[in-house]
Amino acid sequence: MALKSYNSKLVTVTWLGRTFGEGRAESGFVKTAYNAEVSTFQPNAEGGGTRNTSNNKSAKITLKFTQASDSHRLMTRLFALSDADNVGAFEMRDLNGNLLERAASAWPQKRPDSEYSATSGEREWVLETDELIREVEGA
């Protein structure tokens, strides 16, 4: 079995044409989560049931940056844009495994909570999209 390697610098994140490569949190700097299950099962009285398939591909995208980073300041500016200017393409590309997650339109969903302490903290920014596409390139 071949040894696999991972390098977080090979994970790129862009939104509204800006790349977030500096000040990313050490643990979990990008997370995507679909809002709905792919399918659900509805049992019936006879012991069978129906599998229901969802077409909902909406998702939340969480970006986590250190509080003193340029990426955190950039997100502050982008979230302050007007509603007409803060909707745009999102892309997360993992060159370690040729994975791509993208959305034609993503918009601000939640600003981070603020907490201050003796050391620099982290800030979580949440975007939302109506359709997140996940794919493996070259498969």
Image (spheres, rainbow, N blue to C red):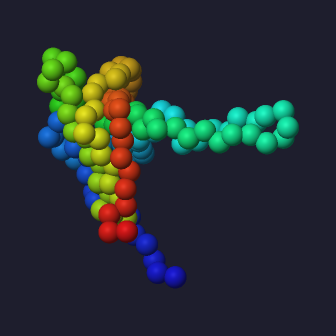
Comparing 8 with 67, the one in front is 8
Residue 94 place in picture, x, y as percent: 32, 57
115 on left or right of 2:
left
Please tell me whether residue 87 is drawn above or below residue 102 in the rendered image: above
**Residue at 28% in and 32% down:** 106
Q: Quadrant of residue 108?
A: top left
Please tell me whether residue 39 is drawn above or below residue 100 in the rendered image: above
Residue 27 visible: yes
**Residue at 79% in and 42% down:** 48
Q: Quadrant of residue 86?
A: top left
Comparing 111 with 128, the one in front is 128
**Residue at 45% in and 77% down:** 3
Residue 36 place in picture, x, y as percent: 51, 34
Residue 73 visible: no
Q: Quadrant of residue 85?
A: top left
Comparing 106 with 45, the one in front is 45
Identify the residue at the far bottom of this view. Answer: 1
**Residue at 70% in and 35% down:** 42
How many numbered circles does the render carry? 0
Quadrant location of the C terminus?
Answer: bottom left
Identify the residue at the far right of this view. Answer: 46
Residue 109 place in picture, x, y as percent: 34, 23
15 on left or right of 40:
left
